[in-house]
Amino acid sequence: MPPRRFEEMVLPHLSAAFNYARWLTRNDADAEDVVQDACVRAVRFFPSLRDDDARGWLFAIVRNTWYSRVSRRAGAEALPLDTSINDPADGALDPEARLLQQLTIARVREALEELPADFREVLVLREIEGMSYKDIAALVRVPIGTVMSRLARARDRLTAILKPPSLPMERMP
Amino acid sequence: MICYEVERDLDGYVDGELAPAAAASIREHLRLCASCRQRVADREALGRLVRSVPYYDAPEQLRARVSGQARRTTSARRLMAWAAAAAIVVSIGGGISLVRSGTARADTPVDEVVNGHVRSLMADHLFDVRSTDQHTVKPWFLGQLDFSPPVVDLASVGFPLVGGRLDYVAGRPVAALVYQRQKHTINVFVWPTSDGTPAVQERAIRGFHVRHWIRNGMAYWAVSDLNDVELTEFVRALQTA
C-alpha cells in the first residue's frame, strides 16, 4: 500500500463529516467550526489512520471535537437554527407537489432537531450514512444491542413528533 | 413467533441486522399478521422520510480551508524530510539516492478502482453518459471499448442505474457503471478477464467497501461508501439480474 495523502483519504468524506456535524450542532456556523477543528486534529493524527475506514476515523474525530466543545460551553445558549432549505433536484415534480415535499422535508428536519442528540445521532448515522450497527457501536462506544434499542426509541419518538397534525404516514412519498 | 418478539426486533429486522434465522422467522410471522406488517411498513416509511431530508454538503470555503491547511502541513513535512535527507547526504558525502516519497503509486486493481471511485466523485466527472435507461447506456459503450459490458438497471430493487463512463484500470480502458442508493454512489468497474473465481471477495479500503467477483468472463469491481449489508444486497441483485 503506497503512502496516501491526507487529501485523497479525508477530503472525499468531508461532506459526510459536515453533514454529521451539522446534525450534532444543529447550525451551520458551529458545524463548520467543528469540522475545521476536527480536520486540524485529523492532519496531526493522520499517521494513526488505519487503512480500512477513513470515514469512521474522521467521524470519531468530529464526534470528539464536538463533544469537547459542548462540555466546554455547557449551558451556553444555543445559536439560532438555520431554517433554509437546500432545494433537492426534482425537476420532474409540479410546483404544488414540490411545495408539499419541501414542507414535508422542513417538518421532518424540525422533528429530527427536536430529538435528544444521542437519538438524532444514531438516526443520522443509520438512515443517512447507512452505517452498520457494528460501526455505529464502535463510533458511539456503546454495545451493539444499545444501538438497536436506541434506534428503536429514536424512531418511536420521531414517529410521535411527526404524528399529531393531519399528515398520515402512509401518504408520505 | 408472537407479535411481542417482532416488536422487540423490529428495528434490527428493518435495518437488515438480524441473524438470517431470526429474520426468516419474522418474515414468516409477517405473512400471517397484518398488524406486524403495518409496523414494518411504518418503520420503512419513516426511514424514507428521514432519508428525504437533503444532505448538508460541506460549504466550499470550508473545503478550501481544509485542503489548504492539509497542503501546508504536507509541504512542511516534505521539506523537513527533504532537509533531513539532505543532511544525511551531506554528512556522509553523497552516494545515497533519495527515495521519492508521496508519489501516488497505485499498484493493485483494488487500489485503482478505489482511486477511480474517488476521482469520479471529486473531479465531478461521474458520467460520460448520464441516463437511467440501460438501453441508452449500453450502446454508448459501443465504439468506446473492445467489449460490451452487461448493463442492467436495478431501480426495481432500489439501486437505480444513473449512468456510465469510460475509466482506466490496470492500463486498459474499462466500463464504469454508476448506480445510486439514496445519497450513496456505487461505481461498478467491468472488464473482460480470463481468470479468477466467481466467489465474491470483500475488502474495505479508505472508508470504502469493495466487492470483486468474476462472472461470464467479466471481472466486476463494485466500490461504494454504502454499508456492508446494502452493498451485499446490491451485488446479489446484480449477479442475479
Image (cartoon, rainbow, N blue to C red):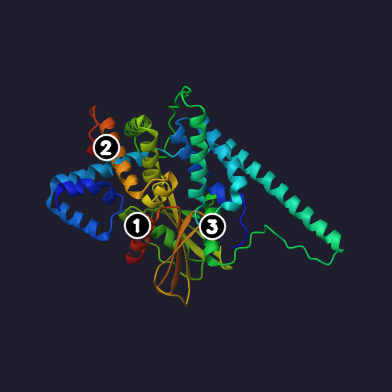
- Judged from the image, the secondary structure of the residue bearing numbered disc 1 is loop
Residue beneath the point at 71% across and 50% down: B77
Q: Is residue B97 visible?
A: yes
Residue located beneath label 2 in the image: A156
Q: Give the residue type at disc 2.
A: Asp
Residue beneath the point at 26% across and 43% down: B43
For the residues marked 1 and 2, what is the alpha-carbon distance in whole angstroms? 31 Å
Which image quadrant for residue B235? bottom left
Residue located beneath label 1 in the image: B154
Mark 1 vs mark 2: in front: 2
Residue A9, percent from left and from top: 56, 52
For the residues marked 3 and 1, what is the alpha-carbon distance in whole angstroms? 31 Å
Mark 3 or mark 2: name the one nearer the start of the chain. Answer: 3
Of residues B148 and B143, the one drawn nearer to the viewer in this rendering: B148
Residue located beneath label 3 in the image: A51
Q: Give the residue type at disc 3.
A: Asp
| In this picture, residue B176 sits left or right of residue A90 | right
Report crowding for label 2: few under 14, some 14 to 19, many 20 or more residues within 10 A (C-alpha): few
Q: Give the residue type at disc 1.
A: Leu
